[in-house]
Amino acid sequence: MSTVTLREQLIEIFTARKEVDLTSGGIVRPLLYLSIPLIITNVLQTAYNIADTFWLGHYGTTELAAISFAFPIIFLLISVALGFSVAGSILVAQYTGAGRESKAEYAASQTVSFSIIASLLLGFLGYFIVEDLLALFGAGADVIDAATTYMQIYSVGLVFVFGFLMFIALMRGYGDTVTPMLIMFVSVVINIVLDPLLIFGVGPIPELGIAGAAYATIIARGVTLVIGLWLMFRGYRGVRIRLSQMVPDLSYGLKLVRIGLPASFEGASRALSIALLLFIVSLFADTVIAAYGVGTRLLSVIVLPAIALSQGVETMTGQNIGDGNPDRAAAANRFAAIALFVFLTAAGLLSAIIAEPLVSIFTNDPAVIDHGATFMHFVAPTFGLFGAMYVYIGGFRGAGMTLTAAGLVILAFGVVQIPVAWVAADAFGPPGIWLSFAVSHLVGALAALFWFNRGTWRSGDLTRDSGGGGESPSPGADVPGDD
């Protein structure tokens, strides 16, 4: 390949701002255009956890158990980021669908500003309270010490985690999922290279143990956030942000909170349910805790298509609602739910069959393998139900109905799963906890289907809301008022 040809290809990649129309034509092609890069991005995202789990699993059982406890605290800390990212993504999607690009740019700029402020405050708070939160789970002192070390480093670097989540969400709202995928790949490569070097120590690099895994993640996030912000400031791909429009606008911040707070509560409630499950799991041996950690990570990998397609449906729903075409949004939701149910059910059944080899990738402890395989036997066959539920949740978000989306998550993982796990664990031991996953997936899928068929989401056009929008243009910038 000649140098000129390569240069031309790079220019094309970083200057084409929109390649597929999400508001007209067929449904399958734009869904695949959005979702395939999202699947890859989410696989790469999970590679952070997989790499940490793999190397720490070979470093020590205590460190592996510590990561299991750190996982829900991480969810809790970034739940605010999820709220801002969902709000920003929805607004960008609906304004883009309505053809109001200056409003989309303003929404993106304000979302980045408020996410930075929130991450700094939460990181500061998290650093000092994380040890007390971990102590509530009732784990052993050695596990709490290791988890605290990991989480304090993570809290210091939380601004990089928040910032990168914003970048992915805002680009997705515009309809660009390829650029985040490419940058996520760079981030994961950095993390995978640094993980063994910092955990075990090589040459002059000291052995840092679980702290090394945290440092590797934060460094990787920081490097790629700089790349993402550079692209958005230059406007090469996706939605553009402008420094002059990043001055915090309290009225717009309140708008982001109003839309995003239910999504934050959704993330927090999911994290809380995982934490409560950990409390129940911690009543058993460390091998059960480790198996829970491995099982939930396998679950996160297998259901990545559900999360990705949910995010793709969120963007398609948002842009078509903004364009005044709810019927097209409904068709996209139904197609995605049926297709994903079939695909993930098949994948789940296969995962249940090969459960022991899957779990043994992460540990050579026979007891952990046995408990982890039992987890997969209960949970994997319900992957399709989880997928259908999350597709409809994405549709509700795209329509601006973040409260409905949060309600479904609370119903499935709070109202249903926790009581079932508590009662069933007392009756059947660890398998009772695994059973609670299957029951929650079934109830959540049925509830999401019922609520979607009611059709109330069709009136979720946020572009007609004139609140916010910081209408002070900077020299040379588009006016962020109504187009």
Image (cartoon, grey):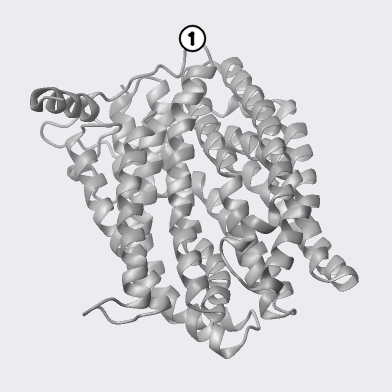
Residue found farthest to the top: 25
Horizontally, residue 110 falls left or right of residue 358, namely: left
The vertical placement of 57 against 404, above or below, is below
The vertical placement of 80 against 59, above or below, is above
Picture coordinates of residue 446 (x, y %)? 79, 38
Horizontally, residue 132 falls left or right of residue 380, namely: left
> In this rendering, does residue 401 appear at all?
no
Residue found farthest to the bottom: 141
Tell me if mark 1 has few (under 14), some (14-19) or many (20+) residues whose alpha carbon lies within 10 angstroms of its own.
few
Q: Residue drawn at (31%, 26%), measured in percent from left and top?
A: 101
Q: Residue drawn at (72%, 37%), measured in percent from left and top?
A: 345
Q: Quadrant of residue 219?
A: bottom left
Q: Secondary structure at mark 1?
A: loop
Picture coordinates of residue 35 (x, y %)? 49, 31
| Residue situated in front as seen by the camera: 371 or 473 | 371
The vertical placement of 320 against 384, above or below, is above
Which residue in the structure is indicated by mark 1? 25
Horizontally, residue 284 falls left or right of residue 35, namely: right
Picture coordinates of residue 107 (x, y %)? 34, 38
Mark 1 is on which residue type?
A: Gly
> In this rendering, does residue 292 appear at all?
yes
Q: Residue drawn at (30%, 44%), measured in percent from left and top?
A: 183
